[in-house]
Image (cartoon, rainbow, N blue to C red):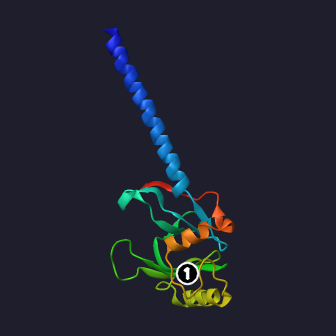
């Protein structure tokens, strides 16, 4: 009577240990792939929104633009332009909408400035960023999105960040 019970307990414990090791390997693999971070010279960051996005196909997370504290500035940004002093572009709604959410400029000094909220400061910051003409990752004429920019800059050692604030899951 004890032997069958012991066999069941040993089997369940072995299964739990193997499941735990498999889950740990999965988390480690995801953290290596989706834990990457691109630190931009102007202070902002490009990183994955989470390790796992339950709302996307294949659970793949989206690339987002963050401020240095980890707050998300924009998710679907196209076009995105990055200079040594500012990041600017147009953030689009997350799901199938043809109207853009907002155009913005982010700098370390002013933070996020939306065109609709403060048009004069937005125009001034945009003119300053455009006059610098030191675009990073892609020239101004090339309109790219956050994923393209992230992939491009993550290949350059100068922009690789050690860690970024990344959630475990998002929906």
Quarter of the image for the N terminus: give it: top left
In the figure, residue 128 lies in which quadrant? bottom right
The residue closer to the viewer here, 69 or 134, is: 134
Residue 129 location (% of width, % of height)? 63, 86
Quarter of the image for the C terminus: give it: bottom left
Query: Position of 148 compared to 6: left or right?
Result: right
Residue 66 location (% of width, % of height)? 55, 68
Residue lying at 34% horizontally and 20% vertically, measured from the top left: 8
Residue 55 in sight here = no
- Spot the residue most to the top: 1
The residue closer to the viewer here, 71 or 53, is: 53
Number of numbered labels in the structure image? 1
Secondary structure of the residue carrying tag 1 is strand
Residue 92 location (% of width, % of height)? 42, 77
Query: Position of 166 compared to 162: left or right?
Result: left
Residue lying at 61% horizontally and 57% vertically, measured from the top left: 163
Q: Which residue is mark 1?
A: 88
Q: Is residue 71 above or below residue 35?
A: below
How many C-alpha atoms fall within 10 Å of the one at disc 1: few (<14), some, or many (≥20)?
many
The residue closer to the viewer here, 47 or 119, is: 47
- Spot the residue most to the left: 1
Residue lying at 34% horizontally and 72% vertically, measured from the top left: 95
Residue 52 in sight here = yes
The residue closer to the viewer here, 23 or 113, is: 23
């Amino acid at each position: 009577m004890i032997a069958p019970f012991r066999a069941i307990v040993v089997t369940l414990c072995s299964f739990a240990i193997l499941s735990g090791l498999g889950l740990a390997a999965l988390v480690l693999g995801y953290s290596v792939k989706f834990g990457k971070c691109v630190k931009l010279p102007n202070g902002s960051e490009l990183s994955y929104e989470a390790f796992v996005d339950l709302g996307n196909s294949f659970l793949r997370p989206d690339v987002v633009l963050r401020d240095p504290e980890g707050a998300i500035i924009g998710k679907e940004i196209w076009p995105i332009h990055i200079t040594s002093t500012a990041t600017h572009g147009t953030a689009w709604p997350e799901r199938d909408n043809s109207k853009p959410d907002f155009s913005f400029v982010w700098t370390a000094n002013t933070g996020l400035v939306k065109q609709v909220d403060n048009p004069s400061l937005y125009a001034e910051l945009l003119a300053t960023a455009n006059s610098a003409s030191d675009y990073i990752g892609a020239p101004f004429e090339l309109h790219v999105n956050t994923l393209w920019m992230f992939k491009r800059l993550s290949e350059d050692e100068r922009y690789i960040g050690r860690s970024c604030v990344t959630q475990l899951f998002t929906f």
